[in-house]
Image (spheres, rainbow, N blue to C red):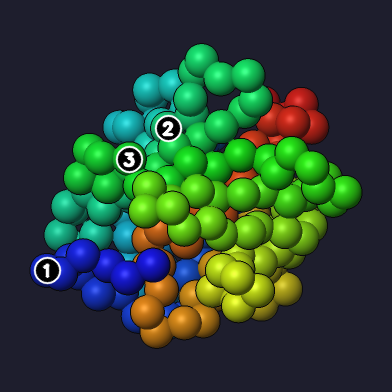
C-alpha cells in the first residue's frame, strides 16, 4: 500500500468527495478536512465512457479509473503511470451483497464491505482498517468523506477504490 518514491505524499485524514462522480462534466477539487485542494478530478476525462483521472494540485495524473468493457461481471481497473494497479469486482462467494474485492497487481487483496449505496463502508487489508467511507461527518448534501486512517496508506488509491465500488454497486442496482 505504500506509494512510489518521489510521489507526492498526501497525509492520512478525511477527504471530501462529490457523489455521482461519473455524472459530473466539469473539473472539481476533492478537498482535505481543512478545505484545501487535495486532488483534482479531471472533467475532460469524464467525457470518455466510464473513465476519469485523479490529479494532484500540480495537475499531474495520479490515478486513472476505467470500467472494463469486455467482462462477464462488472469490473473496474485503477491505473497509475499508465500501468495496471488494481482490479475491483464484487466478491463472488459472499453472503453480503455489498462486499467487493480489490486485487492489487502485487498480489495484495483488500476487502471492501458495508452499506456501499448509503456511503457507509470500510476498506480493509487482512482485517485492519485502511479507510472508512461515510456521510455522517458531513453536512454538505451529495458528498461523502474518505477517512484514511493509516500513515502508510495511499490516499489517491483509497479514494479511487471508494469511487469504484460505489459505481459498481449503483450499476448492479440499475442506477446508470
Name the outermost residue toward the front. Answer: 107
Q: Which mark is residue 162?
A: none
Choose between 170 and 104: the one closer to the eye. Answer: 104
**Relative to 111, 50 lies left or right:** left
Q: Is residue 89 visible?
A: yes
Compute the Cα span from label 3 to label 1: 19 Å
The image quadrant of residue 97 is: top right
According to the picture, the residue beneath numbered tag 2 turns out to be 66
User: Can you give x and y, in whole percent of width and height, for residue 52 in the image?
Assistant: 38, 37
Numbered label attached to residue 6: 1
Q: Is residue 42 visible?
A: no
The residue beneath circle 3 is 84
Q: Earlier in the sequence, mark 3 or mark 1?
A: 1
Which of the 4 quarters of the picture holds residue 81? top left
User: Considering the numbered disc 1 on the image, is that residue within a helix, a strand or a loop?
Assistant: loop
Frontmost residue, 96 versus 36: 96
Amino acid at each position: 500500500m505504500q506509494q512510489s518514491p518521489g510521489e507526492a505524499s498526501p497525509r492520512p485524514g478525511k477527504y471530501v468527495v462529490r457523489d455521482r462522480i461519473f455524472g459530473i462534466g466539469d473539473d472539481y477539487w476533492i478537498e482535505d478536512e481543512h478545505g484545501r485542494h487535495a486532488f483534482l478530478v479531471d472533467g475532460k476525462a469524464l467525457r470518455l465512457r466510464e473513465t476519469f483521472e485523479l490529479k494532484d494540485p500540480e495537475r499531474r495524473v495520479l490515478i486513472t479509473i476505467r470500467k472494463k468493457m469486455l467482462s462477464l461481471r462488472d469490473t473496474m481497473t485503477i491505473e497509475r503511470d499508465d500501468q495496471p494497479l488494481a482490479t475491483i469486482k464484487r466478491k463472488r462467494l459472499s453472503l453480503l451483497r455489498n462486499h467487493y474485492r480489490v486485487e492489487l497487481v502485487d498480489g495484495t487483496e483488500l476487502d471492501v464491505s458495508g452499506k456501499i449505496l448509503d456511503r457507509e463502508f470500510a476498506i480493509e487489508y487482512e482485517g485492519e482498517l485502511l479507510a472508512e467511507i461515510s456521510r455522517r461527518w458531513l453536512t454538505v448534501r451529495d458528498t461523502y468523506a474518505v477517512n484514511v486512517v493509516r500513515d502508510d496508506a495511499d490516499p489517491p488509491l483509497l479514494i479511487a477504490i471508494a469511487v469504484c465500488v460505489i459505481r459498481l454497486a449503483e450499476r448492479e442496482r440499475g442506477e446508470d
